[in-house]
Image (cartoon, rainbow, N blue to C red):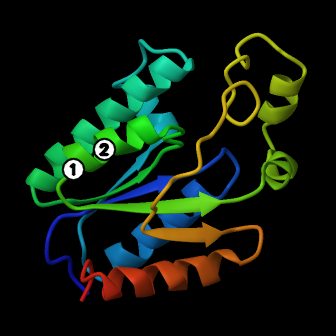
Amino acid sequence: MENRQSWTLWFIGLHGSGKTTISSRIADILRKKGMEIVLLDGDEVRKSISSDLGYSLEDRNIHMQRVADLCSRLNNEGKMVIAAVASPTEKSRDYAKKAIKNFFTVYVKCPLEICEKRDVKGHYKKARLGEKGFEHFLGIGIRFEEPKNPDIVLETSKYAVEECVGVLLGKMKERNILR
């Protein structure tokens, strides 16, 4: 398996939906196949290129633009990028689609109540209690806009991680992202 062109897999969804888990698993599989992969976790990237931003909807959209621009640069250097980002608005996703030549949206779909049960850090609880710093928590203080036309939907409340990974790899082959 090798990448024919440089692509960005843009994983979107609520916190706790499984974006990081599935994107990390895909990155591991592709690296074992000899592919050069850059894995960008939105929370980690925020600490560097977006450390000047907060979590308002406007700041989130700016952060998504910066991540999309980074993905585009990495793709232009011949690297395949896997970005696990919330990307809560259609506006941020539209920007990314325009900025990135070979763009593949992976919607990691999971009901809010399941994401809350998976939340080991207690962020949803803090948001529900209105704690300082959690006023703009996605799904509670800010609405997550369902994507209109994702390339694939992985329903992590219905299927195990390995099943989601298998379906995604199959779709990537079907779309000629992988051979």
Q: Name the amino acid type tagged 2.
A: Ala
Q: Are marks 1 and 2 in contact (CB under 8 Å)?
A: yes
Give how far across and how far down residue 122 sits, in percent: 83, 35
Image quadrant in which the C terminus is located: bottom left
Quadrant of the rendered image containing residue 104 = bottom left
Residue under circle 1?
100
Picture residue at 63% right of the left edge, 40% below the top: 144
Say above or below: 167 vs 142.
below
Picture residue at 80% right of the left edge, 45% below the top: 119
Judged from the image, the secondary structure of the residue bearing numbered disc 2 is helix
Say above or below: 128 vs 43.
above
Give how far across and how far down residue 83 sits, in percent: 40, 51
Q: Nearer the viewer, residue 27 or 125?
A: 125
173 relative position to 121: left or right: left
**How far, Cα to Cα, is label 1 from label 2?**
6 Å
158 relative position to 80: left or right: right
